């Protein structure tokens, strides 16, 4: 910042106390927070003084002469190696220095790629993956994406990173803005809903206003408490915290009263026109034969509808707008329908339910929503929204005006977002459920290994643009990899496809030897693992077929080996632990050999009984067509090869992983544990996590 940060403390006994300067403000925030003991280490004079020194240094990390020398000094300090700047856990020292670097474009765009600062870069990446700092960086990314800078002419620059949140809401007043996120509890949230939720939260926070979570529960045939609970859970995962939670069903009595009055005033009429005929008449601007029926007759049928009688079930209530308007959304839309299915909250108290088009304007206004954010697909219905609200205001003049603000829907290639279409996959058994790892639902994506910070960062980078595009998944998974790679442990798995190859090492250890190795060579904080070295080791048979007799290869995390003999194993050959062997190799370890001199660097597993059965699952898109058109049929574009599994053996350490933990299997990629080790009779199930690279 051009000016030192300033902070003023408010409170009954300290109102007006001020702090100035980066170090002072950071220290107060750390000591006033819940993690003060861990961040400041006031219990240890030596550590707390070191933290103070680093915090002072953080203020000096600014572009200009001497910056590179300062960073090199820090890099040398971290070469020890050290996981954190002070002690063995995150402190205010790490937060302060990380924040200074993260806010500096010169670091992000240039210095972060400098090989001479490898230790500092590794420390920075590890800190960036921590949940609290990742969230802070995600929020900062949304501001960078806003393109709020100016070019030489003084005009606003457009960001290449994505969309923009640097947009003012019409009629917005700080402290008075109220937005709402209104999901229908008829399915799980998908990534498009996540964008809407985060966008509404962003504007509520930007204007110091409120965000309402409202469940649009107007169709009891589709809605369940299961979906309500999962939507709340998904929003919690996305770190979206509403100011309050409401339901459209809370307003059912008021909506009934409004509808009754509108019928009396002749603005609504009962109509029993068959569904297909009504659709055709609306399409061609033909008035229903009941459009001008006596309001008293419509009221009589309205009572039948509320009773759920046979006559009531044959009718719906339509609202009179303009049957000749070119905008077909204004051609007398349906306002109420009968439905005898018990409601998940109100039971059988009601037999008639409002449509979204009729309920939404009233509930928005009634709840004090100032800005209704809607995707551009609703554009033709915006005029309908305002017209219906105006009629409702005739009945209740206290209802305030609501501003509508548009944003683009989030679309992805080879992906269906429609809940109705996703429900088809669930109903036909094409997927395991709404949390299937191939689904674009929040739970499906998280189950596949997407991290919440990556999801938030991607969505916030999209901004509030009105331009409709189809996004590639690669960008999202690339962001995810950048957060996962610095902190996930490395382990080994050997595929069982086609059998194994057995390598006999003539100078290998006579008895199994256990060595302790880092789980991540560049990040000591990830911990250590035990690796067993044996005289006989297993390779993937596909790897063995690439080896030439006399060739020197590298056994990863062990050393070089010269392969002296290669032969096909006897039919049905198996070792003492019951593993099928296809190829036999013999060789000797070459401790003096250079890893740089070998062409093949191969993963291996020891010949021990503690190897773990793994099932590695690889997913692909559910549909084969990049952009699904309305004229397409789902059955014609289903990808029948969207699921593939591979059996493998994992090192003994893989039995200790819990569900949801992420690891890298060397030379295979990143995986998330879906079913952890329970017993030797059942394999550990791991899902492959895409890394953004296009498969060759």
Image: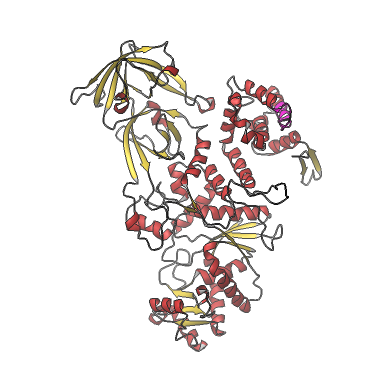
Q: Is residue 570 magenta?
A: no
For the C terminus, which image quadrant?
top left
Q: Position of residue 436 (x, y in %)?
A: 39, 48
User: In screen coordinates, is 385 left or right of 397?
Assistant: left
| Quadrant of residue 210 within the rendered picture | bottom right
User: In screen coordinates, is 383 left or right of 307?
Assistant: right
Give the residue drawn at x 57%, y 74%: 388
Magenta stretch bounds: 51-67
Q: Is residue 687 visible?
A: yes
Give the residue drawn at x 33%, y 52%: 430
Q: Is residue 306 visible?
A: no
> Nearest the camera: 278 or 344?
278
Q: Is residue 62 magenta?
A: yes
Looking at the image, the residue that sits furthest to the right is 16
User: In screen coordinates, is 451 left or right of 166?
Assistant: left
Give the residue drawn at x 59%, y 30%: 113
Q: Position of residue 256 (x, y in %)?
A: 53, 75
Coloring scheme of the render? secondary structure
Above or below, 119 relative to 260: above
> Nearest the camera: 621 or 77?
621
Looking at the image, the residue that sits furthest to the left is 571
């Amino acid at each position: 910042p051009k000016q030192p940060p300033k902070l003023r403390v408010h409170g009954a006994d300290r109102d007006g106390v001020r702090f100035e300067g980066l170090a002072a403000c950071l220290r107060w925030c750390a000591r006033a927070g819940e993690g003060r003991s861990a961040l400041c280490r006031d219990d240890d004079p030596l550590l707390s003084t070191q933290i103070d020194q680093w915090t002072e240094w953080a203020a000096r990390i600014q572009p200009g002469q001497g910056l590179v020398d300062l960073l090199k000094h820090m890099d040398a300090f971290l070469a020890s190696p050290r996981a954190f700047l002070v002690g063995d856990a995150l402190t205010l020292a790490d937060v302060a220095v990380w924040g200074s670097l993260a806010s500096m474009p010169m670091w992000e765009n240039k210095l972060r790629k400098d090989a001479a600062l490898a230790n500092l870069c590794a420390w920075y990446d590890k800190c960036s993956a921590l949940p609290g700092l990742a969230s802070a960086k995600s929020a900062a990314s949304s501001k960078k994406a806003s393109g709020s800078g100016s070019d030489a002419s003084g005009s606003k620059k457009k960001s290449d990173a994505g969309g923009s949140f640097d947009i003012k809401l019409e009629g917005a007043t700080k402290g008075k803005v109220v937005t709402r996120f209104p999901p229908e509890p008829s399915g799980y949230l998908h990534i498009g809903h996540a964008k809407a939720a985060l966008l509404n939260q962003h504007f509520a926070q930007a204007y110091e206003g409120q965000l309402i979570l409202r469940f649009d529960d107007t169709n009891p045939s589709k809605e369940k408490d299961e979906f309500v609970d999962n939507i709340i859970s998904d929003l919690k995962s996305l770190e979206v915290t509403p100011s309050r939670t409401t339901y459209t069903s809370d307003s059912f009595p008021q909506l009934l009263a409004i509808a009754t009055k509108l019928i009396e005033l002749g603005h609504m009429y009962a109509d029993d026109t068959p569904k297909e005929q009504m659709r055709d008449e609306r399409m061609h601007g033909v008035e229903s034969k009941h459009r001008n029926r006596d309001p008293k007759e419509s009221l009589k049928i309205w009572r039948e509808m509320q009773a759920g009688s046979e006559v009531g079930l044959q009718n719906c209530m339509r609202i009179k707008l303009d049957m000749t308007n070119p905008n077909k959304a204004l051609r007398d839309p349906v306002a109420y329908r009968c439905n005898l299915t018990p409601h998940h909250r109100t039971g059988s108290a009601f037999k008639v339910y409002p449509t979204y088009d009729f309920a939404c304007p009233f509930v928005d206004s009634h709840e004090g929503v100032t800005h209704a954010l809607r995707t551009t697909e609703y554009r033709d219905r915006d005029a309908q929204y305002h017209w219906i609200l105006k009629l409702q205001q005739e009945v209740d003049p206290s209802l305030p005006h609501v501003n509508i603000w548009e944003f683009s829907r989030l679309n992805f290639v080879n992906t269906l977002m429609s809940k109705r279409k996703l429900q088809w996959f669930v109903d036909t058994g094409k997927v395991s459920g709404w949390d299937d790892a191939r689904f674009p639902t929040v739970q499906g994506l998280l189950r596949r290994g997407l991290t919440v910070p990556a999801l938030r960062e991607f969505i916030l980078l999209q901004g509030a643009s009105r331009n409709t595009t189809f996004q590639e998944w690669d960008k999202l998974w690339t962001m995810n990899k950048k957060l996962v790679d610095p902190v996930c442990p490395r382990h080994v798995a050997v595929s069982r496809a086609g059998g194994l190859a057995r390598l006999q090492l003539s100078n290998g250890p006579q008895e199994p030897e256990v060595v302790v190795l880092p789980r991540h060579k560049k990040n000591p904080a990830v911990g250590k693992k035990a690796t067993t070295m044996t005289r006989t080791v297993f390779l993937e048979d596909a790897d063995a077929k690439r080896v030439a007799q006399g060739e020197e290869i590298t056994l990863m995390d062990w050393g070089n080996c010269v392969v002296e003999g290669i032969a096909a194993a006897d039919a049905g050959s198996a070792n003492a632990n019951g593993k099928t062997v296809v190829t036999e190799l013999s060789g000797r370890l070459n401790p003096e050999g250079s890893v740089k001199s070998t062409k093949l660097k191969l993963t291996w597993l020891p010949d021990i009984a503690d190897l773990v059965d793994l099932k590695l699952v690889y997913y692909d898109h559910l549909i084969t067509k990049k952009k699904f058109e309305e004229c397409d049929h789902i059955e014609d574009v289903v990808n029948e090869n969207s699921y593939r599994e591979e059996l493998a053996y994992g090192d003994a350490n893989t039995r200790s992983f819990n569900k949801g933990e992420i690891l890298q299997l060397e030379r295979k990629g990143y995986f998330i544990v879906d079913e952890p080790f329970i017993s030797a009779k059942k394999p550990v199930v791991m899902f492959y996590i895409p890394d953004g690279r296009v498969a060759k």
